[in-house]
Image: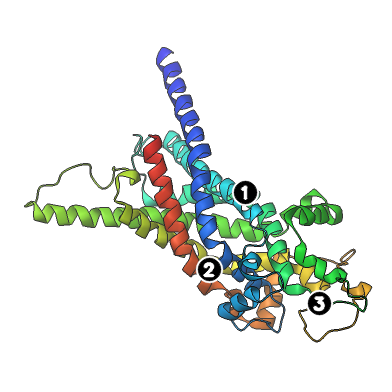
Amino acid sequence: MMLLRAWQRTKALKLSRTLLLAQSVDPIAGIIGKTIEYPFDTVKVRLQSQPYPPIYNGPTDCFLQSLRSPEGGFRSLYRGVSAPFFGAAIETSSLFFCYRIAQSALQTLDPTLPQGRGDKLPLGALLACGAVSGAATSLLLTPIELVKCKVQYAVVTTTTTTNNNGTTPASQQQQRRNPLTVIASVFRQHGILGFWRGQLGTLIRETGGTAAWFGSYEGVLTALRRYTDDAASETSGGETRGPSSSSSSSSSSPVSHQLLAGASAGVAYNFMFFPADTIKSRMQTEEIATSSPLPSSSSQSPPSSSTKPSVTGKKQSTFWRSGAELWQQQGLKGFYRGCGITVARSAPSSAVIFAVFEGLKGWAG
C-alpha cells in the first residue's frame, strides 16, 4: 500500500511538473512562430477563400494587392493578429501538453513500452499520441481560427468608394473589423455553437496533421541522431559514447538537428491535410464572401442595403457540400490554393517552435 501511494505521488508530481512546463514554455514558442508566419497565413486564407472566378493570380499577386490596399502595407497582412497570438499560445501549449499526457497515459496502459523519463516511444505510438493531441486541440482552435479568418478576409471583400456626401460608406467599414466585432456578430447571429463552424475540417487537419507533425519531428530527429552516432562510431573505430539514439532526449540533440527536424515537421503537417484546411476556411468566410461586393475601383454609386451582410435564414453549407462545390468549380487545384506559400512559411516557423521549445525545456530543467 505504501509503495502504491508513493507511486501515485510520483505520478502526480510528474503531472504537475508537466503542466507547469507547458504553461511557461509552450506559449512562448507558439507566439514566436506565429510572428514569423502570420503575413503568409493571411495570404493563404485570402487565396483559399476567394470567390470564383479567382480575383488573385497567385500568392505574389495577393501579397502585392494586400500591400496596396487602403489600409496600407504590412498592417493589412497583420490584420487581426491579436487573436492568432492568443491562439498560438493556446495551440502550442495544448499540442505539447496533450502530447506528453497521451504518452504518459500510453506508458501506464502498456507496461511493455519504455517507462523511463525521456525514453522515446516507438514511432507508431508517437503518431497515435500526436493524433490524440491534435483531436483535443481542434476543439480550442476552431473558434479562434473562425475569428481570424473572418478578420483576414474582410479586407478583400469590401469596396473602397465614397458616396456623394464624401463620407465613408458602410461597406468600407468592414475593413476595420476587429476580433471583438466579429465575436459579437457571430454570437448574435448563430449563438455559441456558431464559433465551431468548420470543426470537422479542423478536426481532420489537426488529427492527421499533428500526428504527421510530431511523427516527422521525432522520426527525422532519430534518423539524424543515428547518422551522427554511426559517423562517430566509424571515426572512433567502432566505439560509441553517450546514450543510445533510442533513449536520448530531444533536448540533447544539436540545435541544427532540431531545426531541420522541425522544418520537416512543418512541411508534413501543412501539406498532407491542406484540402481539409481549405474547405474549413471557405466555410468560415462563406457569409462574408456571399454578402459583400468584390473590390471595384470603378464603382461610384452609394452602397445599397443589399451590400450589408444579411445571412438570416440562409442555409449554411456543410463540410462535404463545400468540398463538392469547390471540386465542381475549380477541381483539384482549388483545394491546394495557397499551399505553396503555406508550406514555405511553415518550415522556418515550425523549426523555430521546436528549437525554442527544446531550448526553454532544457533551461527549465
In this rendering, which labeled residue sits more in front, label 3 or label 2?
Answer: 3
| C-alpha separation, residue under disc 3 versus residue under disc 1 | 31 Å
Confirm whether residue 183 shows in the render: yes
Q: Which residue is mark 2?
A: 342
Foreground residue among 186 and 222? 186
Q: Which residue is mark 3?
A: 293
Residue at 51% in and 41% down: 97
SS assignment at label 3 = loop
Residue 86 badge: 1
SS assignment at label 1 = helix
Q: Residue furthest left?
A: 237
Confirm whether residue 208 shows in the render: no
Amino acid type at image mark 2? Thr
Amino acid type at image mark 3? Pro
Where is residue 242 shown, x and y percent of the image? 19, 42
Residue at 79% in and 66% down: 174
SS assignment at label 2 = helix
| Mark 3 touches mark 2? (CB < 8 Å) | no
